[in-house]
Amino acid sequence: MSLLNAFREIEQALESKLGKLESLKNDPAIKQEIDFEEKLLNLMIRYKKTIHDLRQLIQHDAFGSKARQQHLYAQEERSSYRALPRTYRHPVTGELLETRGKSAKLKMWEKKYGFRTVSRWLQPETL
C-alpha cells in the first residue's frame, strides 16, 4: 500500500470518529452523565473523600453491617455444599440403606437388580 493511500484511509477513519464524537456530544444522556460526574467530583473534593470512601459508603448502604455479614455467610455455606443423605428400601427384605453417595452396598444392588430398579427404591424425604 502506498503512503498516500494509507494517509487517506487514516484521514477517513478520523473523520468518521469525529462525526461519532460530535453526535455523542449532542446526546442528552451523555450530557447528563458528564454533569453528574462533575457534581460528584466537586462533592468529593469539598468533603475530602476518595473513591474508596465512596465505594465503602455505597456498599454499606447496599448491605448494612449485619445484612452484609449474613450475605457473606450465605455465600460460604453455598461453597461448602454437602450432599443430602438418601434412603433406599429393598422391597423384598425391607432392608434400609442410607447413603450420601454411591456406597458399596448401593453399587452391589445396582449391579444385581439394575440401576432403574434400584432408583425406584429411593424413599421420599421426610422432614
Image (cartoon, helix red, strand yellow):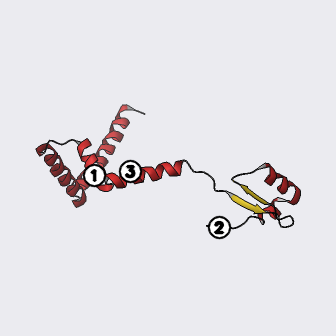
User: Quick one: label 1, few (<14), some, or many (20+) residues within 10 Å?
Assistant: few
Q: Earlier in the sequence, mark 1 or mark 3?
A: 1
- In the rendered image, the quadrant that contains the C terminus is bottom right
From the top left corner, tell me how far across and down residue 3 is, in percent: 36, 31
Relative depth, front residue between 107 and 48: 107
Relative depth, front residue between 125 and 119: 125
Asked if 47 appears above or below 86 in the picture, the reply is above
User: Between tags 1 and 3, which lies in front?
Assistant: 3
The part of the image, by quadrant, that contains residue 118 is bottom right
Residues under labels 1 and 3: Cα distance? 16 Å
Left or right: residue 116 versus residue 39 is: right
Q: Which residue is mark 1?
A: 58
Left or right: residue 83 versus residue 93 is: left
The disc at residue 126 is 2
User: Quick one: label 2, few (<14), some, or many (20+) residues within 10 Å?
Assistant: few
Q: Residue at x 31, y 54 (%)?
A: 64
Q: Earlier in the sequence, mark 2 or mark 3?
A: 3
Residue type at the position of mark 2: Thr
**What secondary structure is marked by label 3?**
helix
Q: Residue at x 85, y 59 (%)?
A: 114
From the top left corner, tell me how far across and down residue 61 is, in percent: 28, 55
Left or right: residue 52 versus residue 125 is: left
Q: Residue furthest top?
A: 3
Q: Which residue is mark 3?
A: 69
Residue type at the position of mark 1: Ile
From the top left corner, tell me how far across and down residue 45 is, in percent: 13, 43
